[in-house]
Image (spheres, rainbow, N blue to C red):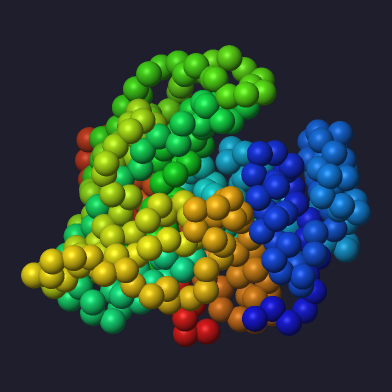
Amino acid sequence: MVKHTHRIGILGSGNIFGRYVTGLARYPELRIVRVGDIDVARAKQAAVEHDIPAWGDAAELYADDTVDILVNLTPPVHHARTVVTALEAGKHVYVEKPLATTVEEGRTVLEAAARSGRVLGSAPDTFLGSASQTLRKAIDSGAIGTPIGASAFISHSKAETWHPNPAFLFQEGGGPVMDMGPYYFAILVNALGAVRSVGASSRIGAPRRTVTSPGRTVDSVDVTVPTHAAAVLTFASGVIATSQMSFDVWDTDLPAMEIYGTEGTLSLPNPNHFDGDVRLRRHGEGDWTVLEPAVELFGAVGTREQARRGLGVRDLATAVEGGPHRANASFAFHVLEALCAVEDSSRSGRTVRLESTCERPEPRWSA
């Protein structure tokens, strides 16, 4: 529960900006007061369109004393630098995923947060949604017995068909591992605990992608990061998860995510969404059972509401007031290290043992 009004400044007014504006509108205690962007004209256009009172460049946003929480929507390659600058400017920060693009940058960000005394949170926040929380509650209650294994399959988001310039998805900081992987790995860590080691292989599929989206600003993009990866994650608990992450699988009938236990299976909907049916099938049962959501829905399933963002920002505001912080920096860093280990393992041909660990976040239904 957020008790006070928090003034939000958003850095970056690109493609995902509107999703945060509409999502944060659910919470009157979170008031957007400024937009900052390297393109000041774009910042002004976004501010006028969404009735936000102030706009300007990044420096003006950092210097604005009326802003206490900065929401960082810059491209991933800029996350570390801009997060550190915002923390040093005295802002609490919530940054889009991933926390940074390398483990070294991630450590730098954590150190800056510790020095600043500010609260740092990071996407993804979909593990705070009803689907992932329902999954967690089912596991914790013993619905499938002892968890043994898991599978997670990421197929192509087909960004070339809807994003005006998807180049960042196929360059450093992008690819299916760093773009979509955070959603899946965060949910696995929330459900199963810390990852101990990662073994993986990856490759580039098509080296150039044709962009067909309406209003596109480029006709093609060159691919410089792996677009197809397969990984085995071994958790500290002993659970073994397999994951395929690909921008080369356009169509598939594979499930998004399943958890396998000694007494049954749990099936999860798209981890990029907050809500959806979580299904349970215990050994010997003829049909799947749809579980009752453990917490309230963030938005109506199957509608554009599911694309909204903002639950993690509210989580940060709760933490600023002394409440539990679930989408916290140490959790995000552990997810980042696991993601980076996919490429490290692929490049070295060896299993990578993670140096970090984290606690499973406090479940929302206990709040």
Farthest-out residue, bottom: 366
- Image coordinates of residue 132 in percent, x first then y, are 41, 65
- Image coordinates of residue 15 in percent, x first then y, are 66, 39
Farthest-out residue, right: 53
Q: Residue at x 81, y 35 (%)?
A: 42
Q: Is residue 308 left or right of residue 258?
A: right
Farthest-out residue, front: 286
Whether residue 13 is visible, yes or no, is yes
Q: Residue at x 56, y 30 (%)?
A: 162
Number of marks drawn: 0
Whether residue 360 is visible, yes or no, is no
Q: Is residue 168 above or below residue 297?
A: above
- Image coordinates of residue 1 in percent, x first then y, are 65, 81
Q: Is residue 119 above or below residue 111?
A: below
Q: Residue at x 68, y 71 (%)?
A: 317
Q: Is residue 120 left or right of residue 3?
A: left
Q: Residue at x 67, y 23 (%)?
A: 215
- Image coordinates of residue 83 in percent, x first then y, are 67, 51
Q: Is residue 6 above or below residue 93?
A: below
* Front-lying residue, 104 or 301: 301
Q: Is residue 250 left or right of residue 365?
A: left
Q: Is residue 314 above or below residue 352?
A: below
